[in-house]
Image: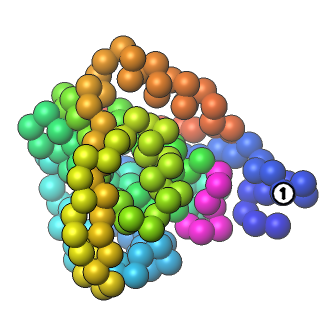
Amino acid sequence: MTAGETGRGEPDPIEVHLVLMRRRHLRRVLEIEHKAYPNPWSLGLFLSELGQRQTRHYVVARVAGRVVGYAGLMVGYEESHVTNIAVDPAWQRHQIGTRLLINLHSEALRRATRNMTLEVRMSNTAAQAMYRRFGFETEGIRKSYYSENGEDALVMWVHDIDSSLYLERIGRISNAISGVTIDSTGPGPQ
């Protein structure tokens, strides 16, 4: 059985805590980063991002005190860019990525942006499916975006994230999550 799984192979309802990423989380974040990406971010890059609280938002997901995933957002005029989302392979299929993306959406709204964008590997169909569920649509391709293998990236956008129609979508996604999410990331001072 994998972490958080019942004897029937179904996910247990779990309690996931979302907290702002801090330096103390980076050892575990880097472990996940190395599992998730062939060209992982460095400690220095994460530290640089964490130092830019006015335009960045980084969050970790913890289960039983252990970091099992993380996500980041870069905020600019009327748009937010999802910099990364990664979940420990042992915790995939437990809606951790969904919880993290809901958190990023909330932060994008809090910072008064109306649109969100991201890049995703052409081969990462699982992530693309999650993003499409959130209303992201492909609006372009970045040729040879990933330097380690020259793979293309899809550029995906979702617009009008503050509209009542989109908020209803987020509500449906949130209501379908099994277990409990305790979000302690905001709206306190950054």
- Which of the 4 quarters of the picture holds residue 88? bottom right
The residue tagged with tag 1: helix, strand or loop?
loop
Q: What residue type is labelled 1?
A: Gly
Q: Residue at x 25, y 46 (%)?
A: 139
Count neighbours of disc 1 (C-alpha within 10 A) and say few if under 14, some if 14 to 19, many if 20 or more: few
Q: Residue furthest right?
A: 7
Residue highlighted by disc 1: 9
Can you give x and y, in whole percent of width and height, for residue 176 in the image? 63, 31
Over which residues does the magenta segment extend?
88-94
Q: Is residue 73 left or right of residue 91?
A: left
Can you give x and y, in whole percent of width and height, for residue 45 in the image? 22, 73
**Is-magenta flag for residue 10?**
no
Q: Can residue 61 be seen in this view?
A: no
Quadrant for the N terminus in the image: bottom right
Can you give x and y, in whole percent of width and height, for residue 84 in the image? 34, 59
Residue 39 vs 65, above or below: the answer is below
Q: Residue at x 30, y 69 (%)?
A: 152
Q: Which residue is drawn at 46% across and 28% down?
A: 170
Q: Which residue lies furthest to the top in this view?
A: 164
Q: Is residue 54 left or right of residue 174?
A: left
- Which of the 4 quarters of the picture holds residue 136? top left
